[in-house]
Image (cartoon, rainbow, N blue to C red):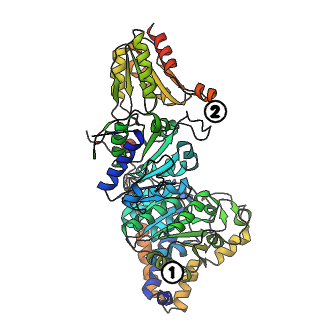
Amino acid sequence: MAVMGFAEAINSALDVALASDPNVFLLGEDISDPGGGVYNITKGLSTKYGEHRVRDTPISESAIIGAATGAALAGKRPVAEIMIMDFLGVCLDQLANHAAKLRYMTGGQAHVPLVVRMSAGAGVQFGAQHSEFLEAWLIHTPGLKVVMPSTPAEAKGLLLSAIFDDDPVVFIEPTLLYFGAAKEEVPDGDVRVPLGRANIAREGSNITLISYGLHVHTCLAAAAQLSALGVDAEVIDLRSLVPLDIETVLASVSKTRRAVVVHEAVGRSGFGAELSSLIHEALFKELAQPVRRVTGADTPVPFAKPLETAFIPTADTVATVACQMCS
Amino acid sequence: MAFRHMTEPSIDDLTTMYEIQARIVATDEQFRQRVGRGQATLIYYSPRGQESISAALGARLRPQDYLVTTYRGLHDQIAKGIPLRALVAEYLGRTTGTCSGKGGPMHVTHAESGVMVTTGIVGGGLPIANGFGLAALLDGSDRVTAVCFGDGATNTGAFHEALNLAAVWDLPVIFVCQNNGYGEHTPIARSMRVRSVAERAGAYGIASAGVDGNDSVAMWHAIGAACDRARDGGGPTLIDALTYRFHGHILGEDLAYQPADERAAAIAADPFPAYRARLIAEYEISDTVLDDIDRRVAADVDDAFRYALASPEPDVSSLYTDVVAEVTV
């Protein structure tokens, strides 16, 4: 066990994977030393494993995902870095039309054990093209798995599971967690957190707050506020959206009869809509209130600080909505 | 290396290329006839006219080498050695097809033959071919990857990104542009200002060759030189193989966009009978040898269609399989 921050934990997972399997390699823009990427996530790895296994690429996102897909089809376990999630827009054909569909199109002859890592999210005033969460695009594409960790230990364990998974996994790293996640004890070595298993981040009995990644912390902060008001909130950290641990969600909502889904991506056709629908379909008669969503605004992400702050869901909003539902 | 370029194709190489073309021509004819008669329903992009290029690939690539192709890929798939029964069955959506009927004519993969990806996205295969090349580089193997695409694909961003990356990483990839003069319905002169696709290699600092894609022997030399370069660590090659497609973009479409005299001239210069005549005149291969090949091919193609048409369509229970790995609980 060592105490690590979020970035350090991701670096540790990559280190463990590179050390344990010669088929693992990394590729992406600026990822080699001395910098180790714009957020220093891969720092030290090219020095340790060589630039043939930690490969800088041109600014060519389609070429990055394509090369990773081909190498994965040939038996490698590539970990590609797309610097910022919005850049998926320039390589979505390779990911959605090729990596995602190849197992199916080949009738199971081929598989694509590929991980695509990326930073995502608002809160650092990068403006509309460097701040989005786009998980809804990916969830809508059968064949992709979608993972978003919320803590350092989760990040390491989920990333190791993703790398050794036999399907393409998009691994979304909330940028604010690089800087803001509380350090915690992270297991040494190859200790994996399985995909498709949600974590109950806080137990409670009156209402279920469901989120993933950064906004698990928003929900925990809301739960603390609610506790002072006599409302006992349960917080579920989904960890992976595909595969989805719907059983844990439904068991919790069966107990609390109330649910709020929280995410930063725009609300319209976001993952909250899907989850709300799944809960209603399964538990309609048991619900005390309709499922509510607290999400990013249905707008591009703005630059100016007050606008950006207004875009992002807050613990206050989550607590207010939850209070209304419990009153 | 210079010496190897001097080598001329053996009689075996020449007859292999003849047999591949005969197989392509006969299979294509069956598809066109059966679609025309309503005996088969499929979206079909005939490769007829472009088969010399595939024949050279088939003769030059080793079994373990990889091939990536496109929706107009029947000729490449046959040339790389996909068994005809499984190939035809896949085109017809049968459970005995290479992909159990889930891929169809635009998405054929047969890993055993090295045909790894057939893409329906123009330009989409080029970045993936680099990945196969990269895997060979990481493994220190001498495996080569060839990727086929049309002239239209050279106007995509994927082409640019892929050739540039292949260049900077010295990847063992052969980029084979089957330049049939049209991107879907638009002639090449309205799609690019450079005089030839081969010129584009200069933008990436890689080797290139402009070749008569209807000349099997010239293609055999060009593909061979590119294979040697790739296996010797010399990096990628762009081959601009000039050819023509006899049956337009999709079978059954209105061909008004192609001048009729242009098409008629191309068909009059049909590379397949021309190659047969050349084998007899220039290489003294007998009619008997070629007739034997024709008979064997006709029997194989007939057998493949009988087999495919008699094969069952997939059970609907397979709709949900192969999306992701099966989870064992």
* Towards the viewer: A66 or B154: A66
Mark seen at residue A302: 2
Residue B242, position in %: x, y?
A: 63, 74
Mark seen at residue A8: none
Residue type at the position of mark 2 = Pro
Residue type at the position of mark 1 = Ala
Residue A106 visible from this viewpoint: yes
Tell me which residue sits at (56%, 80%) in the image: B273
Q: Secondary structure at mark 1?
A: helix
Q: Secondary structure at mark 2?
A: loop
User: Up-down: is A100 above or below A316?
Assistant: below
Residue B144, position in %: x, y?
A: 44, 71
Residue under numbered circle 1: B225
Dividing the picture into quadrants, the one containing residue B205 is bottom right
User: Up-down: is B317 above or below A60?
Assistant: above
Tell me which residue sits at (41%, 68%) in the image: B137
Q: Residues within 10 Å of mark 2 (few under 14, many from 20)?
A: many
Tag 2, which chain?
A
